[in-house]
Image (tube, rainbow, N blue to C red):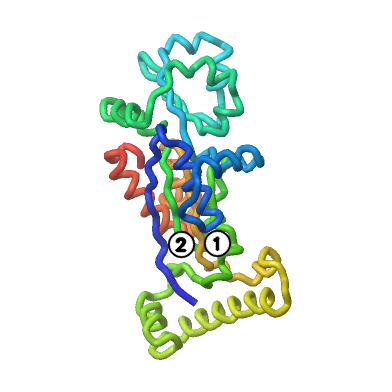
Amino acid sequence: MKIIEPSIQYWKESTQYANEHIARCARICYRSESGNDEKLVTALWNNNHRSMYRHATKYFCLPKHYLKDYALAYYFDNNPFIATLITDTDIFVSANLQWIKEHDNFYNVVAKWEISDIDIFNLAKENNDIYNVIRYTFVVTTQISTSRELNRVSPNNIAEQSTRYVYDDGTICKPHWLTKEDCDNYEEFGKYDKISLVGQYYITSCEQAFDAYKNLISYYKLNKQDARGLLPLDTATVCAYTYSGYEWKHILDLRYRGTTGRPHPNAYIIGEMIHNQLQIITKGQVE
């Protein structure tokens, strides 16, 4: 068994290479790192696994007077699949690619005002509010229990590693209370020398759970998808999340700032990492 630290990565999307970004996020589910991007992305769409397209983005900058077009304004009204910023002269819009591809009527109207990720980041330097409609992908390594908290966002733009791959190398993502000293001693000695009593009990229980999980599969021929019920909730998982600045603010309100109640410490750790990275990316405009 291994014990790893929680972590995050920012994956910047190039709208010019949307399929590359979709494929990269999708491969998290299959614990794969390479392959034919075009073939994978086409298969995802044709097989109705289209949620991976939510990690790709289309940006638009429309003249503001198009709000008078009621057919177009209909799409902006309380639409959870697009983010909108209205300025004195323009309407800035971001939308996930699945929604765009499934709404040809909208795209056919706004396509001539499409802009790239480079364009919108440059515009955000002139108007900081635009950072809120830009979409950001973060890849999070955390506990299964913590991913469940982060997943409670609607609409969901998530790619999560399947539990079937836990069989290869049972890995725990260190919970907030387990000391680094206990983890280091476990890694160094392989057993329980110099590990605190609570650390010993916790690590032993996790090892037993992983052993039982593997035995169900190896000796009793139970499917991995059924045996996973024995996995500890602190089993490590990897997830990609793609949300607009507005949406990340809401998520961080819940999991970092605790506006509706104290966040779980494990969720807070991830929330703090994402908050700090967003501060760097957006020059402090998305908090």
Q: From the viewer's perspective, tell me whether residue 81 is left or right of residue 90.
A: right
* Residue 149 seen anywhere in this rendered image of the structure: no
Residue at disc 2, secondary structure: helix
Q: Dividing the picture into quarters, in which one does residue 14 lie?
A: top left
Rendered view: 209 above or below 281: below
The answer to which quarter of the image holds residue 214 is bottom right
* Quadrant assignment, res 269: bottom left
Q: Do we see residue 97 in this rendering?
A: yes
In the rendered structure, are the residues bearing label 1 and label 2 in contact, judged by CB atoms less than 8 Å apart? Answer: yes
Q: Residue at 55%, 32% (x, y): give it.
A: 80
Return the x and y of residue 11 as percentages of the image width and height. Answer: 39, 46
- Which of the two residues, 238 or 222, is positioned nearer the viewer here? 222
Could you tell me the amino acid type at mark 2?
Asn
Compare marks 1 and 2 and give the one earlier in the sequence.
Answer: 1
Task: Say the numbered circle drawn on residue 266.
Answer: 2
Local secondary structure at mark 1 = helix
Query: Is the C terminus in the top left, top right, bottom left or bottom right quadrant?
Result: top left
Which of the labelled discs sits on residue 116, or is there none?
none
Q: Residues within 10 Å of mark 1 (few under 14, many from 20)?
A: some
- Give above or below for 54 relative to 160: above
Residue 277: horizontal and vertical position, in percent? Answer: 33, 48
In the picture provided, is 276 more to the left or to the right than 65?
Answer: left
Q: Amino acid at mark 1?
A: Ser
Q: Does residue 221 appear to the left or right of 231 in the view shown?
A: right
Depth check, front residue: 27 or 241: 27
Q: Which mark is residue 145?
A: 1
Q: What's the residue at 31%, 42% (across, down)? A: 281
Q: CA distance from mark 1 to mark 2?
A: 9 Å
- Residue 138 at x, y = what percent? 42, 48
